[in-house]
Image: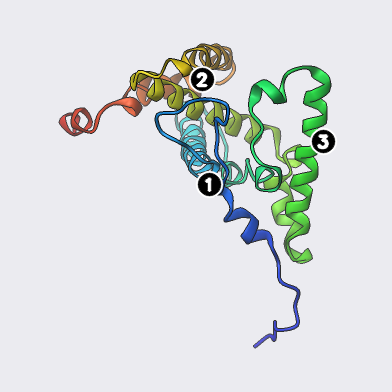
Amino acid sequence: MTDNNNNQQSTFLAWMFRMPLIKRWALMYCVKSENIAEHSHQVAIVAHLLAVIRNKKFNGNLNADRAATIALYHEASETRYGDVVSPTKYANAEISREFKKIETLAEKECIESLPEEFRDVFDELIVQDHVDNEYKAIVKAADILVAYIKSLDEINHNNPEFQHVEINLKNKLDQLTGDMPEVEYFMSIFLTACTATVDKLSSQN
């Protein structure tokens, strides 16, 4: 048996376990609060499903499990410096560049918190500049879809705060459907039920 008593403790998992403490939509009133752990879990489910749809319906060749894993870690940088709302992050090109530098630094700090022998495995999952572009696109689409579903849910609960969010995200999804038919398929088959009441869901089974 290997003696690990003298090995330095890794803080990687401790940082990841702080995801539930980091709130999303910080500048907005929410009927239902949301943290990045919940968000990442939902994005992972949707990214996995999008990859399956592409493979089964549109001759894709993605590893759906890898798409889900990348999605689970896509907000890992926020465990270091918190969630920065989009209006701030994308206020102008210069600010966006600076926040990108901070995010990349945080991602690399996450990697450096691992034992060195594991870093190459997680580098292509966490450091977004090193994620394969095809998987990055799937995860980004899933991220937008999950945020869109959130906006619809808030609006359904009579929260007008999310009306402009819904419009902006719908425009992004409309742009995606041209290159990603799996997004259009997802919206036609899965989207409506995501904001249905439990009674309505039960009546459809």
Q: Position of residue 127 (x, y in %)?
A: 74, 44
Residue situated in front as seen by the camera: 62 or 30: 30
Q: Are marks 3 and 1 in contact (CB under 8 Å)?
A: no
Q: Earlier in the sequence, mark 3 or mark 1?
A: 1
User: In the picture, residue 25 is in which quadrant?
Assistant: top right
Q: Earlier in the sequence, mark 1 or mark 2?
A: 1
Asked if 7 appears above or below 40 in the picture, the reply is below
Color encoding of the figure:
rainbow
Q: Look at the numbered disc 1 and give the secondary structure of its residue.
A: helix
Amino acid type for the residue under numbered disc 2: Pro
Amino acid type for the residue under numbered disc 3: Lys
What residue is shown at x 47% (from left), y 39% (from top)? 42
Q: Position of residue 152 (x, y in %)?
A: 41, 20
Amino acid type for the residue under numbered disc 1: Asp
Identify the residue position indicated by label 1 in the image: 65
Q: Are marks 1 and 2 in contact (CB under 8 Å)?
A: no
Please give the label number shown on residue 181: 2
Q: Position of residue 204 (x, y in %)?
A: 19, 29
Q: Earlier in the sequence, mark 3 or mark 2?
A: 3
Identify the residue position indicated by label 3 in the image: 101
Q: Cα distance, mark 3 to mark 2?
A: 32 Å
What residue is shown at x 56% (from left), y 45% (from top)? 72
Q: Position of residue 28 (x, y in %)?
A: 53, 25
The quadrant of the picture occupied by the C terminus is: top left
Asked if 9 appears above or below 43 in the picture, the reply is below
